[in-house]
Amino acid sequence: MNLTLKIWRQKDAKDIGGFETHEVREVNPDMSFLEMLDVVNEGLILRGIEPIAFDSDCREGICGACSLVINGTAHGGHKATTACQLHMRKFSDGETITVEPWRARAFPMVKDLVCDRSAFDRIIQAGGFVSVSTGGVPDANAIPVAKEDSDQAMDAAQCIGCGACVAACKNASAMLFVAAKVSHLALMPQGKVERERRALNMVAQMDTEGFGACSVTGSCEAVCPKEIRLDFIARLNREYGRALLHRGGG
Amino acid sequence: MIGAHGMKLAAQLFGTTLGRKYLMALSGAGLFGFTVVHMLGNLQLFLGPESLNRYAQFLQSNKELLWPARLGLLSMVAIHLWSAIKLTAENKAARPVQYIGDPNPVAATFASRTMLMSGLIVAAFAIYHILHFTVQVPEINFVSVDFKTFHVAEGAQKGFHDVYRMMVTGFQNPFVSGFYILAVGLLCLHLSHGLSALFQTLGLRNHAWWPLIQRFGIVASLLLFLGYITVPVAVLSGLVTATTGCDCCK
Ligand code: SF4
Ligand code: FES
């Protein structure tokens, strides 16, 4: 298949950037989107042109590194699919495809399609952990966990921190990501101990990073490759409200 | 102790995005309650002049209740508006560079993306509405009469403000009625998203309740719309007429 790519190019953080058009011939429909970009880059390198920078790592939908807005939708708009798992057979011959980076103030641009998502790391550092005491590994059955809680916690723990939720949200809000992390830990007995401090600190960090607020539009849920649900955001709101009632925000 | 606790709580509520969403949801819930009561009040038009005028007299004569209620409403409006404007500004700032390739509002409804606009138009209408029927500024009622001169001429209610005749006369101008219907339509569009979103924001929902809450939001908005527009529609179609006027108006 033959395609026209309209790709965002930007030298560095200071460059204003702009779209560049590339004609791609004889694309194998079984390639993933990233493999297609690899082929384009090989062509560019042969012609002595700087290849297109984009993030990737696992290429099997589990690391959260790939981050492309394809035709206006984060990860390309296929249910529960990361860009690296998106295959070219989903596109039609002769199609023009626009490719852009995540756009958010909290994710500053690095180059081309790469943005800096370390804001997520700082949110995790603010409370997305359990302060584990040292010692031997406890017996697996020593702490009983209700089946529903473990199911819910596992669902929330699926979040790979890709940031598609931020990219898709009209407010560039990180609520779905923070909600997944807060819910995951608050549901487990080990995480419950610090639940209030965690909710307050992670929300504070989220604000400091400059993410927007949640308008409950549901765009994040629609693009999330791990199908993190909107009800986790309600759970985060509940956790936050609980922290306010118990600690008055202190 | 309570003081320090309260200060921290206020700092959280006013100082974080989640806190401001809480304020918006709580004030929105209060204002929704008001729109329901207001609509039930309006519908007394169909019970005839006696009922409506008695109800109006009851509201107007209890100054000790009227003013606290008015101040309460005003502060809810102020909080709702302040949090809306502040959050919208932050949300806009969170995405300084927009997507160019066909920005796709995945899953987000029209109502959810236009909350500020619909809200501001409703607020502008509310100012007109208060000047029209509460302050009763004759210059803006466009029917060339002074509503303040409308009094019940005879019977047990002699001397009561004739709110029945005011409403019927007021809605006789099709433009005034049209603006009213438009504003009520926008209010209900606003509520069709706002009602379910407030449950989400306050964390008062889970997976099982969400479909029901969303349906409640839509159905309640529709009922409100119908309840509100029956009055201008009934007046314009001649179904309800001012039968209590003095001889000269009959
Ligand atoms: S919630 Fe979903 S979209 Fe957001 S970071 Fe996690 S996996 Fe990615
Ligand atoms: S590259 Fe790891 S999820 Fe796409």
Image (cartoon, rainbow, N blue to C red):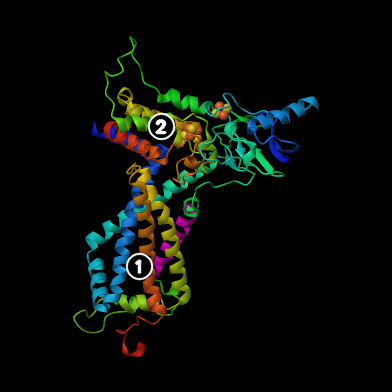
Instruction: Choose between B113 and A150: the one closer to the eye.
Output: A150
Cα distance between the residues tagged 1 and 2: 42 Å
Residue B41, image x and y in percent?
29, 68
Q: Is residue A6 left or right of residue B95?
A: right
Mark 1 CB near ligand 1 (8 Å cut) = no
Report whether residue A207 is seen. Answer: no
Label 1 sits on residue: B227
Q: Which mark is residue A156?
A: 2
Write the residue at 24% across / 63% down. Answer: B63
The dominant secondary structure in magenta is helix
Write the residue at 43% across / 32% down. Answer: A178
Type of amino acid under label 1:
Gly
Q: In the image, is residue B214 above or below residue A103? A: below
Q: Which image quadrant: the C terminus of chain A?
A: top left
Type of amino acid under label 2:
Ala
The stretch of residues the image draws in magenta is: B115-135
Find out whether residue B133 is within the magenta segment.
yes
Residue B31, image x and y in percent?
34, 55
| Residue projecting furthest to the right | A47
Find out whether residue B147 is within the magenta segment.
no
Q: In the image, is residue A203 above or below residue B124? A: above
Q: In the image, is residue A160 above or below residue B34? A: above
Residue B98, image x and y in percent?
60, 42
Report whether residue A91 is seen. Answer: yes
Ligand 2's quadrant is top right
Residue B189, image x and y in percent?
44, 58
Sort mark 2 into few (<14), some (14-19) or many (20+) by Cα contacts within 10 Å. Answer: many
